Amino acid sequence: MNLKINPERLWANLMETALIGGTQKGGIRRLSLTDEDKRVRDWFKQACESLGCTVSIDELGNMFARRPGRDNTLPPICIGSHLDTQPTGGKFDGVLGVLAGLEILHTLHAAGYETNAPVEVVNWTNEEGARFSPAMLASGAFAGVFDRDFVLSRKDRDGLSFHDELRRIGYAGSIPVQARSISGMFELHIEQGPVLEAENIDIGIVTGVQGMRWYEIAITGVESHAGSTPMWFRKDALLGAAKAVELVREVGVRHGPLAVSTVGVMDVRPNSPNVIPGEVFITIDLRHPDDAVLNCMERELFGALTTALDAISLTFVWERVWHSPAVHFDSHLNEYVRRAADRLGLSRRDIISGAGHDAAYISRVAPTTMIFVPCRDGISHNELEDLTFEQCAAGAAVLLETVLAFDESLEPLQVER
Ligand SMILES: [Zn+2]
């Protein structure tokens, strides 16, 4: 059977739900566990139920819309992403992955097509982390990265807790949040970067998520008078920070094109026009798809920084304050996506995600991959976030093609026991 998604219906659903929390500039403000989140959840639940699916909700509000298959002892094929947005978010980040899943349910339902395995479309709670920090809380809890009570106790800036807000909007389910068997998890998402558009590529085969590390560095010199301290006598902490900025850039360039390195914060003390800075605080963000390369970047950077600061009589201390290991998605699932794109005559390339996603956590407990589509000017987390109707349709078509081929590979257990 030659199933095809209905791209007009998908687009119409994206535009309809975009009105829930819609902003004047054409974006969405739909923070997790707000009234707007409740409204879009209600909409999604109703849409899935009208297709004969059963929607179950776990104790962190993750929603699973299940369409039975021929063999319901097979672990489900999961498709999903998130319906929450940034405070000034766009219409596609996350929503595309959930509503493309809904479109697949529509397509299967309309054709009366029976998959081997059950299909579940998932909405993960609080992906963005904009209201309750950190990001990807509920998919993280599903994968065992966060403890359930830790998630429930998270508070927003007004002191409202995840737990209370989840109950208030009526989405505190009874199913324990924990990993269960999944045949394969597929997340369709906009790239949130400029690569696919710049190269005029339809589909990104996401092979992983880059590793990320954050550091805090305090550089110490001697505060002294800008007028009466000769140049040869100075211990200028800001000069040390300037050298650090340069070294951070160099380490990223040296390990290019995949490495990126940034100094994003600089705090100069005492920050006065006629005082030589005695202390400077900076942050460093290093990213690369390979943890071994990150180790190497870290060693080189702090080795070079020690030499450079010694030479100008400064001392410094550094600490790695956060890290997220590199994620490698399932290579078999990647291959299904490649073949699906080829069958549909769409151009494709392998790509590494620069941002974190629910799929990154789920990949710890189930075979997982992502499919990227381009977005205009690489802009995301912005009300201007956009992609074309054709790009959206291509992504959803690849998702359906991938899921169907993957499902065919799952053998139904005819008779057991
Ligand atoms: Zn997202």
Image (cartoon, helix red, strand yellow):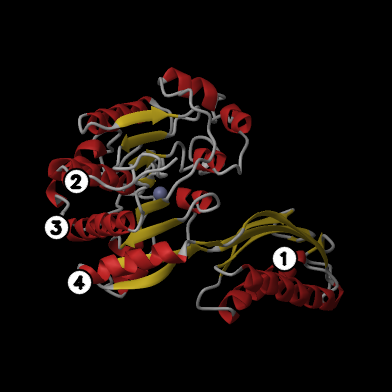
Give the alpha-carbon distance from disc 1 to disc 3, as whole Å: 65 Å
Relative depth, front residue between 357 and 406: 406
Q: Where is residue 33 in the image (x, y as percent from the top left)?
A: 43, 28
In whole angstroms, how far apart are the C-alphas of marks 4 and 2?
A: 24 Å
Viewer-proximal residue, 82 or 381? 82
Can you see residue 191? no
Q: Nearer the viewer, mark 1 or mark 3?
A: 3
Q: Which of marks 2 and 1 is in front?
A: 2
* Number of residues whose C-alpha sits closer than 10 Å to that of mark 2, classed few (under 14), some (14–19) or many (20 or more): few
| Secondary structure under the numbered disc 2 in the rendered image | loop
Question: On screen, 250 above or below 21?
Answer: below
**Which residue matches tag 3?**
2
Q: Give the residue type that dot 4 points to.
A: Gly
**Do the residues bearing badges 1 and 4 touch, measured as CB atoms within 8 Å?**
no
Which quarter of the figure has residue 394? bottom left
Q: Is mark 1 on a helix, strand or loop?
A: helix
Distance of mark 1 from mark 4, alpha carbons? 55 Å
Query: Which residue does the numbered mark 1 point to in the structure image?
Result: 238
Measured as percent of width and height from the top left, residue 299 is found at 74, 73
In terms of sequence position, does the residue under pointer 2 or pointer 1 come before the other?
2
10 Å neighbourhood of mark 4: few (<14), some, or many (≥20)? few
User: Which numbered tag is attached to residue 208?
Assistant: none
Residue 345 numbered mark, or none: 4
